[in-house]
Amino acid sequence: MAKIVIATIGTSGDLNPYLAIGIELKKRGHHITIASSPQYAQKVISSSLNFSSLRPDIDYNDPALALLTMNRFNGTEYVLKEMLMKPISETYEDLLKAVDGANLLVSHSLCFAGSMVAEITRIPWISSVLSPNNFWSCYDPIVLPNAPFFRHLHRLGISINERIISLAKFATRDWADSVYQLRNKIGLPKGENPLFEGMHSPHAVIALFSDVFAKNKPDWPQQVVSTGFPIFYETFNKHDSDILGNFLNKGEPPIVFTLGTAAVLDANNFYEDGLKACKELGQRAILLTGTQKRNIPESLGSTDDVLQIDYAPYSDVFKHAKVVVHHGGIGTTAQVLHAGCPSLVVPYSHDQPDNADRLLRLGCARVEYRHRITHSVLKKNLQKLINNPSYGQAAKLLQQQINHENGAIAAADFIEIKLEESN
């Protein structure tokens, strides 16, 4: 039995995959601690895992914060530079305490203190990424929120894409100053850029997504292993489960609208427009609106045709959907692929545009950026998704391929191999 600390920072979508891995490792007899934001303590403990608090203590349910973080032009800069890099000393102190006596550290890509803790303590370290946009590749250029036209860069050739990556490094050159200052303070060399090469452990990197979604490229780190998506199956209280079951039994498969746990705080007219489009198309709808009352359309109409609830586990809902309209977060994307459901992706920021483009290329989705969304745009895209069977066929084929994988088991297998190698 080993003591393993898994450190993750971010929203529920950044926590859930690691809960799935932690639960699998605990089944094998290991002592698992999840180090994360204090607001997730109860969720971790209720999964029968140990919890260690990791600053910064960010309220991910704050709508004002969502307006800043979901901005497609500078939201990613705000998250990385202001929210995570500036308080890096606090993260480092908390993680240093969490790994005391541990045999292994596994860290999420946003936990920039992971590399420093590993270097100071000499604890074996595995880094991980949830989405392919963490690998800057000239063979597979990522789609940036503020430059969606980058999706066409595949055509320009490797040398042009290498220059663009160099420009990205130059444009973000001061984002990690706080990390470099801390490294100097604790006696470590400057090291590599934590937003690029320095994000990854030199010994082992787990890509927690399917190679059906993104295949390993020649310029990815050589130590990368893809495991597939780790799916965390959340529990659903009986009352809400009965409501959902009764609705689903009353008619045709619905169109499901969701914006995850962060973008939902900046929904604007997403649900109102979605409901209007469904009514005009004669389609049933499920609206997962979150807890913001302003997200609930004023006139929901017949309860036989429309169900509005704050949230439901995606694994319980998506498998019954005709189409899922979502923001393209990697956790939601994984659940859509597992459900074999076509989707309309409305990306906001961060990894969402890149994930959306990958679904588009796989033939199972359409994409419209959130600033272009109106009820007529939603209606047009939903019509095409419903009337063209190729989207559903592509989604089912991908489901068959992906459901042969089990990301949590594969990740646990890899972690145990690295544990043996470190002994």
Image (cartoon, helix red, strand yellow):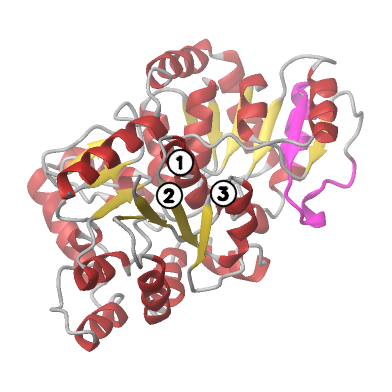
x, y (%) of residue 191?
14, 72
Distance, label 1 to label 2, CA atoms, is: 6 Å
- Res 320 → quadrant: top right
x, y (%) of residue 398?
41, 19
Segment tinted magenta in the rendering: 273-299
Residue 357 vs residue 5, the one in the foreground: 5
Distance, label 3 to label 2, CA atoms, is: 43 Å
At label 2, counting other C-alpha atoms closer than 10 Å, the crowd grade (few under 14, some 14-19, many 20 or more) is some
Q: In this picture, is 27 found above or below 35?
A: above
The amino acid type, in three-letter code, at marker 2 is: His
- Circles 1 and 2: CB distance less than 8 Å? yes
The amino acid type, in three-letter code, at marker 1 is: Lys
Query: Which residue is labeled 3 in the image?
Result: 370
Residue 283 forms part of the magenta stretch: yes
Quick one: SS at disc 1?
A: helix
At label 3, counting other C-alpha atoms closer than 10 Å, the crowd grade (few under 14, some 14-19, many 20 or more) is some
